[in-house]
Image: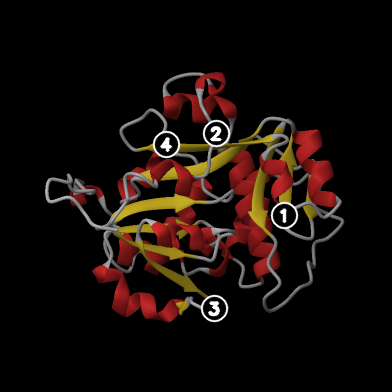
Amino acid sequence: MEQSPSSPPLVKKDPSSWPPLGWRWEYYHALLELVPDDLVVDEVLVGLHWTLVRSGDRVGMSMTYREGEVSVPQAGDFAGKPLREVARLVLSWNFVEAAIGVAAIGAGVNTRERVESLLGYPLESYDPKSAFDALREKLRGKRVAVVGHFPGIEELREDVELTIFERAPLPGDTPDPAAEYLMAEQDAVFLTASTLVNKTFPRMLELAREKFLVLVGPSTPMHPLLYTWGVDVLAGLVVLDPERVWRIAQEGGHRRLFQEGAFRVNVPRHGGGL
């Protein structure tokens, strides 16, 4: 994992656009403003692994949470509600509700048209891959933190000095409060967008935004606003086959939908794909 002395720096940003420290709920209200106010919810699905919200041919996704309160008081009454109203559930401390809110934001933001605008070319010309695979060579020899234990993430240890911050740590992981102490030592950070649900997103963003920062996961809002917050790469997805993705999620499917209906894409702030 030796780093070449001539290796270029990972980070070159303009901090003047960053919101000030302590700008907590404002991140969420800014995301809510991105959701079109003329869309309504057709369906909500809280599946075994994924929570989905559909508005017409738009589908947003979030990881299904099982921490804390696991009931949904509005269950059965979402259809017909304004999408932005449902998206406001992202502010809830009931994480099942908050996941619905994050998925609603995704339904409003993560459209094919927006993702292609970020890329600068059609999705058909893009080779979908995970952010970890796409950035593996760029990060070789670097100190890399991942907030959230993604499947197969341990393989990165072959190429980088890896620290995994996790709320429910597995063997080899580091409890996520340690990020307050260890984030400063990192060269690059992968931040799971699921932190939007449990409200650790603002603080983790503040700790990591001076690093090479990748916001990763199906919950990632694919919008250039996040580049102004210090994010270098938006690693999310767009749902191209709503019916197939919905069927897989409602039948308990996990990663299969990444190959059948949901298209992964990694877009750096200067445009183009990785």
Quadrant hosting residue 239:
top right
- The residue depicted at 64 percent of the width and 41 percent of the height is 107
Q: Position of residue 166 (x, y in %)?
A: 51, 73
- Give the residue type that dot 2 points to: Pro
**Mark 2: few, some, or many residues within 10 Å (few <14, many ≥20)?**
some
Q: Gap between marks 2 and 4, in whole Å?
A: 11 Å
Foreground of the two, 38 or 93: 93
- The residue depicted at 73 percent of the width and 59 percent of the height is 49
Foreground of the two, 256 or 58: 256
- Give the residue type that dot 1 points to: Thr
Question: Which numbered disc, 4 or 3, marks the residue closer to the eye?
Answer: 3
Residue 264, visible in the rendered structure: yes
Name the disc covering residue 152, or none: none
Reply above or below: 222 against 241: below
Name the disc covering residue 51, or none: 1
Would residue 2 appear left or right of 28 to someone viewing this image? left
- Residue at image mark 3: 169
**Mark 1: few, some, or many residues within 10 Å (few <14, many ≥20)?**
many
- Residue at image mark 2: 128
Foreground of the two, 273 or 18: 273
